[in-house]
Amino acid sequence: MRVIAAESIHQAMTFPALIDAIRQSFAGQFGMPPRQVLPLLAGKPEAFAVLPAWNESVIGCKLFTYFPQNPAQGKERLHAKIMLFCRESGEPLALLDGTSITLWRTAAISALAGSYLANPAASTLILFGTGKLAPYLVKAYASIRQLNDVYIVGRDLTKAQQLAASLQADLQKERPELRIQAAERSANLLQKADIICCATAATEPLFPADWVQPGTLVDALGNHHADGSEIDTELVVDGLLYVDSRANCLNEAGEVLLPLQAGRISEQHIQGELADLCRADQLCWQADRIQVFKAVGTALADLAAARLMLT
């Protein structure tokens, strides 16, 4: 059995290969029971999560722990591992670092959805969020659209400027035409966007719906709370809504649950999930509508990314 550390994953992984692997996994046959997030003690935030999935070649399960108080002690709040087994014999194949896989696959899911839901001529990305996932999202989107401008918006403008400068230097050789800069949120800024990606811990809308132009893709992936939302409910009600997993989003995504509970939409308002997009494998972007993609994460994406490391 192989043991694959984070360093090996970061060295070997590329977005074009990963996006294609996830696309093939979602287009094929798979099993993916609802993920289980188990509180370790009632009323406390610490949790243990189990995310199983399988396809025709491998069985996988991601396990992670969530201890939000850890950063105060100099420790990571989340620790994750992925186990892979042979689908034919059940033999263990590999134990992989799950944190690095999660960063790569989360960004790849956004870009995969964007390949179907964003303007083919998209040139401007606005990213809300300056956390660990932010660089991966910029690079993932840059791999599926010929971006010219990226604007990074964060609560801390200095941190956003530092991230923009770091990414600009990192991508200078590969994408010299790409301009990356920090910005403050405004109607004028958002009206430039072809893609708006929200990757924050916000549980209230980051901007009003009327700042967003038709033809824009709004990608919301930061919030995992059933009673919160990163985006204005009007975007969900008026837009074309797609999700990574119908079951998972109907369980924990406030972006979907809040308008559903208010009677503003029905479950049929969801146009499709990622598997539907991958099986149809055609552009679904509409120039006269706002496209909304909500993701909370799936075990199948973890499985695809982990399987790719064995090839």
Image (cartoon, rainbow, N blue to C red):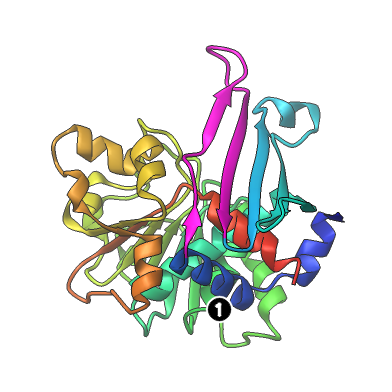
Q: Is residue 264 above or below residue 161?
A: above
Can you give x and y, in whole percent of width and height, for residue 244 in the image?
41, 55
Task: Look at the picture and state if 79 lies above or below 119.
Answer: above
Assess whether residue 287 is covered by the magenta stretch: no
Frontmost residue, 154 versus 261:
261
Residue at image point 27% right, 50% down? 208
State the extent of the magenta-drawn residues as a range: 29-55
Dot 1 alpha-carbon crowd within 10 angstroms: few under 14, some 14 to 19, many 20 or more: some
Q: Which residue is mark 1?
A: 143
Image quadrant holding the C terminus, namely bottom right
Residue 35 versus residue 150 in the image, above or below: above
Residue that extends furthest to the front in the rendered view of this protein: 89
Is 47 magenta? The answer is: yes
Q: Left or right: 217 with respect to 287?
A: right
- Residue 276 spot, x, y in % from top left: 34, 64
Residue 162 appears in the picture as rendered: no
Q: Is residue 305 left or right of residue 247?
A: right
Name the residue furthest top: 42
Residue 195, can we see it?
Answer: yes
Tally of marks: 1
Residue closest to the eye, 304 or 130: 304
Pick the quarter of the image with the N terminus: bottom right
Whole-percent x and y of residue 72?
74, 27
Residue at the extreme left of the image, as rendered: 263
Q: Quadrant of residue 41?
A: top right
Q: Position of residue 234 (x, y in %)?
A: 20, 49
Q: Name the secondary structure under disc 1.
A: loop
Q: Is 125 positioned to the left or the right of 160 in the image?
A: left
**Residue at position x 74%, y 66% in the image:** 309
- Compare residues 263 and 303 and report the one nearer the observer: 303
Residue kind at label 1, given as amino acid type: Ser
Residue found at x 73% / y 28%:
70
